[in-house]
Image (spheres, rainbow, N blue to C red):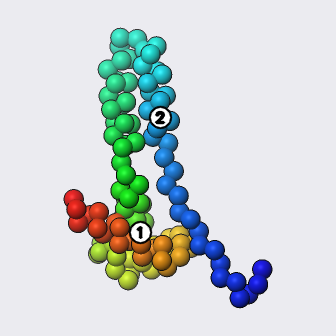
Amino acid sequence: MSMFRKPQPLAALVLRDAPDVVAGLRRALETATDSERPGLERALLVAEDAAARPDEELRGRWVRQRLAAAGHQGPADSVAAIKILRRAEPGLTLLQAVTYAKAAEAAEARV
C-alpha cells in the first residue's frame, strides 16, 4: 500500500431484513390457527410498514441514534454533529458524514 494512495471510502450499506420478515409472516399465516391469526396479521402490517420505509429515513434514524448516544441535541448537520458521527464510525469519510447529516436534518425538517 502506497503512502500516497488515498484510502477508499467505506460504503455505508442499509441492510434491510424487513422483506424477509414479511415473507416469513405470510408463510406463518398460511398455517396459522384461528387464535394465532390476529397477532400474525398485526405483525405483518408492522413489518410491511417497516419494509416500505425509504433508505433515507433509515439513514436519518441511524444518524440521530449516534448523535443521541453521544448526548448531542443540536442540529444533525452542525460541525459538532459531524465530528460525533466520525468518532462513532471511524470508517466514515468526511463527505459521507456530511451527506448523512444533511439528509437527517432535511428529513427531520419534513416531519
Q: For residue 47, which quarter of the picture?
A: top left
Is 70 in front, or is 59?
A: 59
- Residue at the spot 34% in from the left edge and 76% down from the top edge: 77
Question: Where residue 60 appears, x then y in whole percent?
Answer: 37, 62
The residue singled out by tag 2 in the image is 21
- Residue at the spot 48% in from the left edge and 77% down from the top edge: 95
Amino acid type of the residue tagged 1 in the rendering? Tyr
Element type at marker 1? helix
Question: Where residue 41 appears, x then y in whole percent?
Answer: 34, 24
Residue 72 showing in the rendered view? no
Please say if 70 is above or below 110.
Answer: below
Q: Say which mark, if any, is on residue 100.
A: 1
Is 71 in front, or is 91?
A: 91
Q: Quadrant of the C terminus?
A: bottom left
**Earlier along the polypeptide chain: callout 2 or callout 1?**
2
Element type at marker 2? helix
Question: Where residue 1 appears, x then y in whole percent?
Answer: 78, 80
Question: Where residue 48 appears, x then y in whole percent?
Answer: 37, 36
